[in-house]
Image: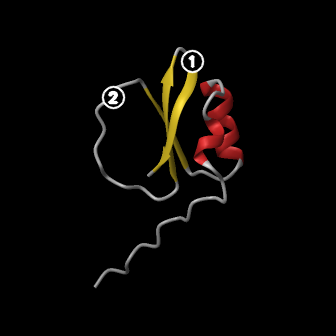
C-alpha cells in the first residue's frame, strides 16, 4: 500500500494582508512567507474546487489583488 502523502501546511500568514497590493509584489511576498504555490486569477475565473494545501490564490483586477484565499 502506498504511503499517505503529507500535504504542506499553510504558513502563519493572513491571506487578507495581500488585498490592495500589486499582483507582482504580492506574489513575491507570498513566496518569501512560505507559500509553496501562488496563483493569480482574473475576476470571474472558473476554477476547480480542488483544495491544495500550501496554495494561495489571488483575484487580480487592473494589476491589483482584490481578493485572496487559501487552497
Q: Is residue 65 left or right of residue 42?
A: right
Q: Position of residue 63 (x, y in %)?
A: 57, 18
Q: Which residue is mark 1?
A: 63
Q: Residues within 10 Å of mark 1 (few under 14, many from 20)?
A: some
Q: Which residue is mark 2?
A: 45
Q: Is residue 59 left or right of residue 20?
A: left
Q: Residues within 10 Å of mark 2 (few under 14, many from 20)?
A: few
The residue sitting at 56% across, 51% down in the picture is: 36
- The scheme the figure's colours follow is secondary structure
Q: Is residue 26 left or right of residue 6?
A: right
C-alpha span from label 2 to label 1: 15 Å
The residue sitting at 70% across, 50% down in the picture is: 33
Q: Position of residue 6 (x, y in %)?
A: 46, 73
Q: Quadrant of the N terminus?
A: bottom left
- Residue situated in front as seen by the camera: 53 or 1: 53
Q: Is residue 61 above or below residue 67?
A: above
The tag earlier along the polypeptide, 2 or 1, is 2
SS category of the residue bearing label 2: loop
Amino acid at each position: 500500500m502506498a504511503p499517505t502523502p503529507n500535504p504542506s501546511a499553510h504558513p502563519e500568514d493572513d491571506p487578507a494582508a495581500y488585498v490592495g497590493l500589486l499582483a507582482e509584489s504580492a506574489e513575491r511576498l507570498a513566496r518569501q512567507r512560505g507559500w509553496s504555490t501562488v496563483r493569480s486569477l482574473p475576476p470571474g475565473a472558473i476554477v476547480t474546487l480542488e483544495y491544495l494545501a500550501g496554495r494561495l490564490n489571488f483575484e487580480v483586477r487592473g494589476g491589483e489583488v482584490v481578493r485572496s484565499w487559501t487552497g
